């Protein structure tokens, strides 16, 4: 930070203790002090509002105004996110302003065609997003571990792949609702199936509606979308004008299961319009796979926060500002 600002930056090894207090008092005009990680103080994340308020009151002694710019935590009621904004005149910073500008476009004024790509482990983690975005999107592409619940909803056996049995009926309803809304739901047509979870697993590519016909039978694990599906997803993404992506297509940390995620990421870099990577595992994936941030229209700094915003939820750390 000091190199970027071209000036000394003092790091206090506590949060509101004597060292932090002394550093703030000694600040010259334009000076910068960085406090120790606030979560090291129990008051930051306490479930007791009074404890959070007490910690926020101590933080408030350090300044006259509070500028909140940690978008990744605005969905949480934490002392430095929520209570501090009540204790001081507050506003959002430039990062949060940018996040809101981009995410608002996704929900209100997207250029079309508009495609949403969802992956990750569980359908249950994406229920609110699917509910809120279905009436808005043109195409919904589903991969990752969550796709097996959709495949089961279509009556297909999925071997030992991740399956949320209690969400099968929900997926059936989503497929029905999408058809009624004229939204095209695109599921993988082939799957990379493994003998076990691990880098040394044997793998085979099989049709998505015949996963148990792989050499591993009912014990096979689907760990990535197949090459045919990756090519289809990439083509759909590259032809869209607005794309939001959240959740990897497979276990990208293991190279043999990273091709689907890599194909999706590469396609997003080719979008002639707005491409948004929805934070969390997706943001981690593009960096691990060697992509640069500036290849995408926007990489959100908030996984959970961006999803909750797109779900239409009130984010406490935003709602309290100003």
Image (spheres, grey):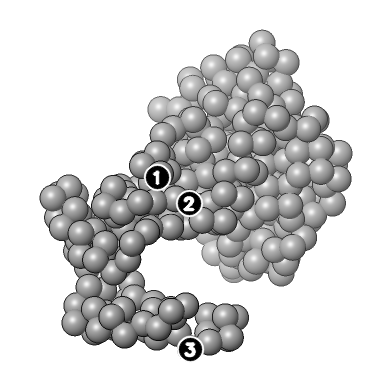
Q: Nearer the viewer, residue 25 or 77?
A: 25
Q: Is residue 2 above or below residue 197?
A: below
Task: Give the SS element for disc 3.
Answer: loop
Q: From this viewpoint, which residue is outermost toward the top?
A: 180
Can you give x and y, in whole percent of width and height, for residue 75 in the image? 40, 45
Dots 2, 1 in contact, CB < 8 A? yes
* Residue at (29, 69) in percent of width and height: 62
Q: Residues within 10 Å of mark 1 (few under 14, many from 20)?
A: some
Position of residue 258 relative to residue 243, above or below, is below
Mark number displayed over residue 92: 2
SS for callout 1: loop
Report whether residue 6 is seen: yes
User: What's the mark number on residue 321?
Assistant: 1
Task: Please state if 87 lies on the left or on the right of 179 as rendered.
Answer: left
Which tag, 3 or 1, sits closer to the chain's start?
Answer: 3
x, y percent for residue 121: 51, 45
Residue at x 49% of width, y 22% of height? 170
Q: Secondary structure at mark 2?
A: strand
* Res 274 quadrant in image: top right
Residue 247: % across, % down: 58, 48
Furthest residue toward bottom: 8
Label 2 – label 3 distance at C-alpha: 25 Å
Query: Residue at position x 43%, y 57% from top?
Result: 67
Residue 284, image x and y in percent? 58, 62
In the picture of the structure, the residue carrying the numbered disc 3 is 8
Which quadrant is the C terminus positioned in?
top left
């Amino acid at each position: 930070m000091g190199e970027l600002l071209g000036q000394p930056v003092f790091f206090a090894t506590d949060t509101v203790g004597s060292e932090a207090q002394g550093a703030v008092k000694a600040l010259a005009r334009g000076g910068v002090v960085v406090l120790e990680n606030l979560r090291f103080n129990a008051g930051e994340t306490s479930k007791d509002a009074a404890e959070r308020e007490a910690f926020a009151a101590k933080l408030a002694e350090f300044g006259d105004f509070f500028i909140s710019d940690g978008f990744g935590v605005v969905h949480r009621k934490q002392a430095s996110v929520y209570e501090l904004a009540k204790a001081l005149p507050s506003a959002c910073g430039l990062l949060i302003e940018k996040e809101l500008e981009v995410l608002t476009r996704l929900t209100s004024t997207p250029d079309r065609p508009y495609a949403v790509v969802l992956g990750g482990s569980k359908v249950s983690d994406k229920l609110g997003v699917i509910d809120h975005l279905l009436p808005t999107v043109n195409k919904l592409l589903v991969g990752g571990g969550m796709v097996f619940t959709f495949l089961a909803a279509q009556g297909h056996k999925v071997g030992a792949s991740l399956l949320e049995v209690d969400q099968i009926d929900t997926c059936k309803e989503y497929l029905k609702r999408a058809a009624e809304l004229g939204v095209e739901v695109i599921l993988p047509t082939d799957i990379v199936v493994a003998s076990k979870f691990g880098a040394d697993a044997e793998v085979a590519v099989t049709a998505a509606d015949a996963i148990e016909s792989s050499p591993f039978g009912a014990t096979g694990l689907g760990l990535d979308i197949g090459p045919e599906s990756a090519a289809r997803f990439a083509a759909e993404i590259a032809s869209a004008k607005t794309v939001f992506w959240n959740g990897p297509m497979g276990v990208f940390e293991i190279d043999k299961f990273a091709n689907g995620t890599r194909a999706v990421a590469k396609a997003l870099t080719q979008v002639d319009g707005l491409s948004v990577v929805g934070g969390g595992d997706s943001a981690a994936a593009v960096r691990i796979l060697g992509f640069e941030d500036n290849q995408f229209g926007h990489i959100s700094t908030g996984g959970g926060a961006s999803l909750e915003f797109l779900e239409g939820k009130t984010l406490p750390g935003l709602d309290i500002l100003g």
